[in-house]
Image: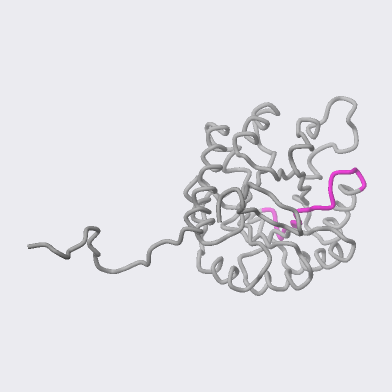
Amino acid sequence: MTASTDKLIIAGREFSSRLMVGTGKYADTQQMKRAVVASGAEIVTVAVRRVNISDRTNGSFLDAIDTGRYTLLPNTAGCYTAEEAIRTCRLAKEAGLSDFVKLEVLGDEQTLFPNVEELLKAARVLVKEGFTVLPYTTDDPIVCKKLEDLGCAAVMPLGAPIGSGLGIINQYNIRIILDTVKVPVIVDAGVGTASDAAIAMELGCAGVLMNTAIAGAKDPVAMAEAMNLAVRAGRLAYLAGRIPRKLHATASSPLEGLI
């Protein structure tokens, strides 16, 4: 498989980039636009509850995003109940954004961990209504399997708490999730730097979604480019197949024929 044929496929949609980026926390719209371009991302997520999606008279944040170039992924950030999340997704669809949604239902304001019970409830309704649902969830293989069984197009387990920059805390859980579900697994939340993104891809994840790691960097545009390269390198390394880990050394040069 080559880079040109290795596509991310979500619900029948093909994407060349496996990096998805958020649009919040930037110093200004111009910085955000430059960072998105540098990231190489094709999927851009936007918090429906935090932008004005109806009044375009004074220029909207959404006008800065070329919808001919990028696929919008409305998200339900800030929702704490299934009802809030469902209503937010319906609003995004009615406003003409997309029925391709990132579903978040948070448990509390301090940890921002998902409320799994409410998440499953919202996912069930939205899938039945025809939404393509990408749920942000805990790194629990059982929950991920339940979301897949409900018809979610992918699962998005956290690597670490949102905005923490801790990287992937439990790689073993991510590996089990990869063995448990057949839909794409996209690490969402916790990435801090390029090596974290590369690790996610080397594990075999289909993609990585991030916002704070780029927008919160000292140079967001440079970090966006670094994340672009890291995701591509990690994916290529996964496809290439790493050598087995060994306790003892193995000579790089052949020993045969030595005197």
Q: Against 166, is 146 above or below? A: below
- Please tell me which residue lies in front, 116 or 151: 151
Q: Quadrant of residue 214?
A: top right
State the residue at coordinates (35%, 66%): 245
Q: Is residue 125 above or below residue 28?
A: below
> In this view, which residue lies farthest toward the right?
94
Looking at the image, which residue is at 88% across and 54% down? 87
Q: How many marks?
A: 0
Considering every residue shown, the one lying at the far front of the view is: 257
Q: Quadrant of residue 121?
A: bottom right
Q: Position of residue 253 (x, y in %)?
A: 22, 58
Comparing 106 with 181, the one in front is 181
Residue at 59%, 55% in the rendered image: 161
Q: Position of residue 91 (x, y in %)?
A: 89, 48
- Horizontal side of 169 relative to 46 (left or right) equals left
Residue 248 on image: x %, y %? 25, 68
Which quadrant holds the C terminus? bottom left
Between residue 129 and residue 164, name the one nearer to us: 129
The question of residue 8 being in magenta is answered with no
Principal secondary structure, stretch drawn in magenta: loop
Q: Is residue 123 toward the left or the right of residue 216 in the image?
A: right
Stretch of the chain drawn in magenta? 94-109
Q: Quadrant of the N terminus?
A: bottom right
